[in-house]
Structure formats: structure tokens, C-alpha cells
Image (cartoon, rainbow, N blue to C red):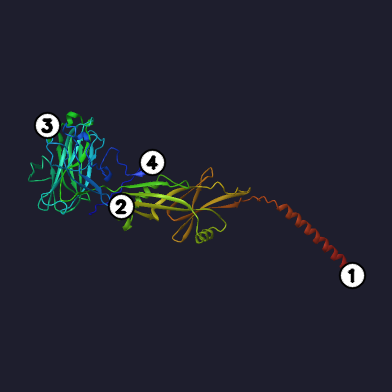
Amino acid sequence: MKKFDKIIGTALCGFSMLALCTPASALTNYKTKDWKTTMPKSECVTTDSGCTGYAAGTAKAVGDTNETEIAGNKYQGNKETSANKWVAMNVGPYVEGGTDTAATGIHEELQIELDKEKILHQQFFEISFSLKDNTGKYVNEINVITENVNNEFLIGIQGVDISGGNWNNNPLAKISAEGVYTYSWTIEDGNVTFTVKTADGKTVGSRTLDIDSTFKGPEVQEISKVGADKVSVRWIWFCNVQTKEAVSVFSKPEVVAKPEVSGNAVAADEATSDVLADTLKNTEDKELQELLANHDATVALEAKEVAATDKEKKEFTDALPNATISKYLDINVVVKAGTKTLNLHELTDEITLTVKVPENLPEVKKGYTRVYYILREHNGEVEVLDTLLSDDGKELSFATDKFSTYALAYEDQANAGNEPENPNTGDKIVSYVIAAGISGVALAGIALFSAKKKQD
């Protein structure tokens, strides 16, 4: 399998979730699950009661990557009629279109691998970019053909670059190098632009046509007559797959960043999403780079309260000898891609986390103030982090960019300038007075005894 440049898209979609938030109606990233392998019965072109419509080939995921293999099947409709001339067509899977209209602009794209061992000399596949009106009725389509001719892939638009199976002198694109290429369709201002680009974004062929004047036929409607605001994508489908092996279609890898932490112990601020995504985008970890290039990935914070080891307890206690540890937390940034899970131990920037103060702590004695701490152990070093206590005293916030074991601790400190109240203080003063009185009497007795002795 050949690789293409990784694409990591992130945008804030709310406090709890970050995803590749392209407009909901724009379908520019087709996943394996999107490809449908049986055309709906409504697509049957005959009126026979037993018509089954198209059997739309097969689509399957390759391992746990973003690669889908698409193969064609013979058309499975009933007898050929004047309206049904494609009995021998090797139709392939399709994906349903979105709701963007020609008036607002439509953009669709696929990433397709051109492999000379899968697509032999004079073998080809076709992709139909089909349009519909607001009732679902067929309007028009742009059909793109890719054929291997003497170990060179010729790509063009049916009726423009190729007619009756014969290529014109200048196909839209001629490609000799194997690899993954992006096929894109754009409809804007009454024109359709089809473009082929390399994995790194270099354009190898592009053509812009007036869709109304270029594509005509008994079934074709003109967008201008239907109304641009009523025309949207019907589907993209592989309408003829005549290749030795299935054609590989790729999805752009997506990164979904979840700033919320599992459980109630810790919460993250909104900026966490951007930091998590930026860390993945700029990672130098080779294994992680490999995963992100070929898989969708989810990056999330995970936190849970844990029991510390004796070694950890000593390390945290040594860092703050006078504090009491309330609880230990294991906080991690976890990346899941395919079947693999990796932990990120450091981020490109700090994020702000908030931990709830336990409700079952002892009451603070009068004359004392409770001070809270967050301690972090990372690579064998324990640090005391700066914290901010909420006005109601129920939450403690701190900034961090490293992840492993944390501890929440507290210390009750005497207020400056105030004598702390102690129920034993009065008793001690009485004891001191009595002791002083006894000492005075003893000293007086000794003095009298000495004077009397001198007189004798």
C-alpha cells in the first residue's frame, strides 16, 4: 500500500469535542462505511416487478487503515430494454451526496491509488459525479475515465477527452508514476472544474467546463433551467470497474480530539483541543507519524484515581513533608489509531485542568488557613505546580504539559499575627505558675536555713 501525506484537521466544535469540522453537507472525505454496495430498488430502470436494480459491486476495508478496495459486479437488472442498455457494465459501489447546492458551491473529492499491477494495459474504471434536483430526480453528471494505456494512466472526462472509447490527442492528465492521486470536482458559477493532484498537492491536470453547454442528452437537464439552488450531489459512484484487481480508494485521516476526561475527577478547558491536535500535527515520534498517515485517530485525556506505590508515596511526601496527600491521580493523553493505542507524555503547550477538592477532608481549625497543592511526578522528578482555588473552594485549577502521576495535597497553616486557639494552653499556664510558686518557697526556705546556721 502506498502512502499519502497525512492530513490533520481540527477545529473547536464545543467544550467536549473537537473534530474535523467541515460543513455538515460537504462530503469530501468518504470512509469505508460510506460506500454502499447495492443500489436502491428505486434505481431500477425497467418496470418489471422483479427488477433488482444495480448490484453495485463490492467495497471492503483493508486492515484497520483508511484504505477501501472497490471492485465491480455485473449489472443485475432484468432483460435489456431501450432504457436499460448496460447489462454488461461492471458497476461499483457508491456514496450518497450532500446538500450543498450549485448556488452555494459544491466540492467533492476522492483519493485513488493508480497501480499498474492492479490496472493493466487497456483496463479502466469510471467514476460518475451525479447531480440531482430537490426532488431527487437525475439532472446531470460528470463521468471521469481512467485507463492504463501502455503503462501510462490517461484521465479524462467522457464526451470531452474521450468519445466512443477513443482518446483525444490531449487527455486531461497523463500519469506515468504510480501513487495516490486526488480527484476533485467543483461546481461554481455554472461551471464544473475537474482536477487531478498528486499526494503533495501538485496539479497534474485540470479542466473547467460550462456544464450546461457541455453535457447534453435526452436524460440530461441543464442546471440553469432547474435552478442552481435546487441542484445538489446525488452520489459519486464507480459506474464501470474493468480492472484486474479492486481499485484502492483512501480517506483523509482525521484527528478527533476530546478535551473532556473520563470520569468526574478532572476537567479540561476549551483550549485543550487545539493543544492536543497541535501536538499530533508536530509530533516527531516515527511510530505515531506512521499511524496518523494511514488511520483516523482519536486523542483524549484519560484520568483516574489510583493507589500510589510506596516509592511514589515517598517521592511525593519528600517534596512536601508538612502536607497531607488527599489522593493520587493517573492523568494521560491517549492516542487511539486503528488497533493501536499510544500515550503522549508531553504536549507542545500547557493545558489547564481542574480537579475537584474532596468533600470528606477534615474541617479547618480556627486560626488556620488550608493551602492546596498539586504535585506532578514526571521522569522521576516531582514538582509542585502553581494552582488556583475557585471562589467557592471546591475546585483547584493548574496548568501542565506533562503526564504521568499527580497528587492532590493540602496543608493547614497558622494565620499570621493570630495566636491559634489551644484548649490545653490555660492548663499549661497554671502549671507554670504553680511550679514557679513552689520554686519561690523552696528558695526562701533555703535562705532562712542558711541565716540561722550562721547565727549558731
Residue found 71% across the figure and 53% down from its top: 425
Residue 215 image offset from top left, x and y in percent? 13, 35
User: What secondary structure is found at the residue carrying circle 1?
Assistant: helix
Residue found 16% across the figure and 54% down from its top: 117
> Residue 218 got which mark?
3
Of badges 4 and 3, nearer the viewer stands 3
Q: Earlier in the sequence, mark 4 or mark 2?
A: 4
Q: Earlier in the sequence, mark 1 or mark 2?
A: 2
Of badges 3 and 2, nearer the viewer stands 3
Residue 313 image offset from top left, x and y in percent? 52, 59
Q: Earlier in the sequence, mark 4 or mark 3?
A: 4
Q: Nearer the viewer, residue 32 or 415?
A: 32
User: Label 4, label 3: how many angstroms apart (C-alpha)?
Assistant: 49 Å
Residue under pointer 2: 292
Of badges 1 and 4, nearer the viewer stands 4
Q: Are marks 3 and 1 in contact (CB under 8 Å)?
A: no
User: Label 1, label 4: how many angstroms apart (C-alpha)?
Assistant: 98 Å
Q: Earlier in the sequence, mark 3 or mark 2?
A: 3
Q: In the displayed structure, does residue 431 sit left or right of residue 123?
A: right
Mark 2 is surrounded, within 10 Å at the Cα level, by few (under 14), some (14 to 19) or many (20 or more) other residues, namely many
User: What secondary structure is found at the residue carrying circle 2?
Assistant: helix
User: Label 1, label 2: how many angstroms apart (C-alpha)?
Assistant: 104 Å
Residue under pointer 4: 14
Of badges 3 and 1, nearer the viewer stands 3
Residue 39 image offset from top left, x and y in percent? 21, 38
* Amino acid type for the residue under numbered disc 1: Lys
User: Label 3, label 2: how many angstroms apart (C-alpha)?
Assistant: 47 Å
> Residue 453 got which mark?
1
